[in-house]
Amino acid sequence: MLNPFKRYSEKVGQPPGTLVYLGEERAEPVRITIIDYDETHLQEEEAQTIEACMPFIDTESVTWIQIEGIHEISIIEKIGEHFGVDPLLLEDMINPIHLPKIEVYEDYVFILLKNLDCNTESAKVSREQISLIIGPNFVVSLQENYSEIFTSIRNRLQNAQGRIRRMQSGYLAYALIDVIVDHYFIVLDEINERIQALEDEIMKDPSPEVLTKINVLRGEQQLLRRPILPLRDVLIEILDDDIRLLGENTQPYFHDVYDHLIQVIQMLEMIRSTVSGLFDVYTSAVSHRMNEVMKVLTIVATFFIPLTFIAGIYGMNFKFMPELETQWGYPIVLLVMLSVSIGMFIFFKCKKWL
């Protein structure tokens, strides 16, 4: 697994704005898709270069430039050149460990956030960095990987569902952020199901492997907090500031996204509390299991104490012990030992110790 903090050492000593990709090395090419639309038309095509996207920017329609892959530095440099993006923001785009943020400029708004995904086979949570550059009539989205996170938005545009084709670029930015936030619910539901399954497993068999799973869950919920909590500050700034490029009519929609994010944060806090409680459940289950084992061992030892006492007395073999010469001495002693055992069993049953 990639350690981005280790790779960050490659930037040490470099001037501010130096573009060094800190993510996982990739061989696949960067994919650029152009979707130009208004209420009456939609045009979608693949592009090979950023220059091919520029003619669409000069039209009155809304243009969505979807870039999948941020590992080619030359494309990032072209974005800065053609869209006038600050070099420091370009540096943030290719830094996968950067926290969500928003920067408002005169000609564009830059928003950086994280998409989360849960692999159903490996049950591991992955993070993908997504950057949005929002202009008067365009949105440039940069995704770290090839993913289907925005497929629903493309379908809505193609089928003219809802009001998205009638609205400006600020509404498209809202729709993209809304999909990402709603995807958080899916990931948290997956985590919650794993927690419930782990609780059942703890009660059945609190093995060391279960403790390892608890530690993995604890690490994952801590990683979830890093991309989710800072996004609240981003949305608060959008709601509190009058950002002209996002449009005044989009404020209610961003407020709705903020409400969803608050629910996500509440679920995240509930998961954090539950995961912490799993350690207590595990400790209690292990203690209960140990108590049951000690109870069985104690009862077994208690049964043999009087029997060992009787056997010890008659095992001394002193010459003048009267019972040693008795014809029925041996079976009588065995009968006494059996009677003691039965009596102790009945006593334990009456006390509900068995």
Image: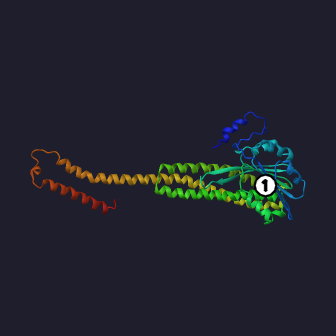
Q: Where is residue 271 in the image (x, y as percent from the top left)?
A: 60, 55
Give the residue displayed 9% in from the left and 50% down from the top: 325
Q: Mark 1 points at which residue?
A: 238
Q: How many labels does the image show?
A: 1
Query: Which color mode does the image show?
Result: rainbow
- Residue 270 showing in the rendered view: no
Picture quadrant where residue 160 is located: bottom right
* Nearer to the camera, 169 or 282: 169
Name the quadrant of the C terminus.
bottom left
Which element carries disc 1, helix, strand or loop? Answer: helix
- Residue 96 showing in the rendered view: yes
Name the quadrant of the N terminus.
top right
Q: Could you tell whether 30 is left or right of 200 in the image? A: right
Q: Position of residue 230 (x, y in %)?
A: 71, 50
- Identity of the residue furthest to the top in this view: 13
Give the residue displayed 52% in from the left and 57% down from the top: 199
Q: Position of residue 126 (x, y in %)?
A: 65, 50
Q: Could you tell whether 252 is left or right of 213 in the image? A: right
Q: Position of residue 57 (x, y in %)?
A: 88, 53
Picture quadrant where residue 81 is located: top right
Q: Could you tell whether 196 is left or right of 114 in the image? A: left
Q: How crowded is mark 1: few (under 14 residues within 10 Å), some or many (20 or more)?
A: some
Q: What residue type is labelled 1?
A: Ile
* Nearer to the camera, 229 or 176: 176
